[in-house]
Amino acid sequence: MSIQDKIGMRVRACREKLGMSVYDLTQKSGIDEKFINAVEKGEVIPALGVLSRLARALGMRVGTFTDDQFRPDPVVTRASEDATVKIHDSVVDLP
């Protein structure tokens, strides 16, 4: 399997796992829909900057698309606003 096929397959798998359409990914990443389709089909090898924008939009690390072992689960997730407030309130209430 070529590197562009591997990257394309992984971008699509991550996007689909999140329930995103190509249009959604376009809106979130700012990358043209036709280019994302070409990446997912393995027709092009995206530049590092493009991979970075795709990774950020999908909540992944760039290595997710290129590592030997594929794990589509995000390494880090954002805390919700409520969780952040609860943690802050707990810290403020400490003696």
Image: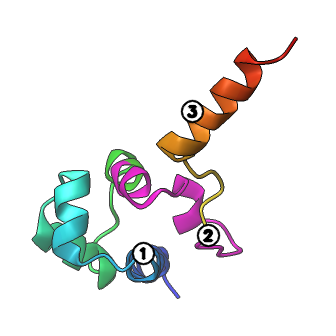
Q: Report the magenta residues as a range.
A: 53-72
32 versus 1 height, above or below: above
Q: Residues within 10 Å of mark 2 (few under 14, many from 20)?
A: some
Residue that numbered label 2 is attached to = 73
Residue that numbered label 1 is attached to = 18
72 versus 62 height, above or below: below
Question: Looking at the image, which is closer to me, 67 or 77?
Answer: 77
Residue 5 rendering spot, x and y as whole percentages: 43, 82
Total label count? 3
Distance Cα–Cα, label 2 vs label 1 = 10 Å
Q: Residue shown at 34%/66% (left/top)?
A: 45
**Residue 25 colored in magenta in the image:** no
Mark 2 or 1 closer to N-term? Answer: 1
Circle 1: element type: loop
Residue that numbered label 3 is attached to = 85
Q: Residue shown at 46%/81% (left/top)?
A: 17
Q: Which numbered disc, 1 or 3, marks the residue closer to the eye?
A: 3
* In contact (CB < 8 Å): disc 2 and disc 3: no
Which of the 4 image quadrants contains residue 54?
A: bottom left
Circle 2: element type: loop
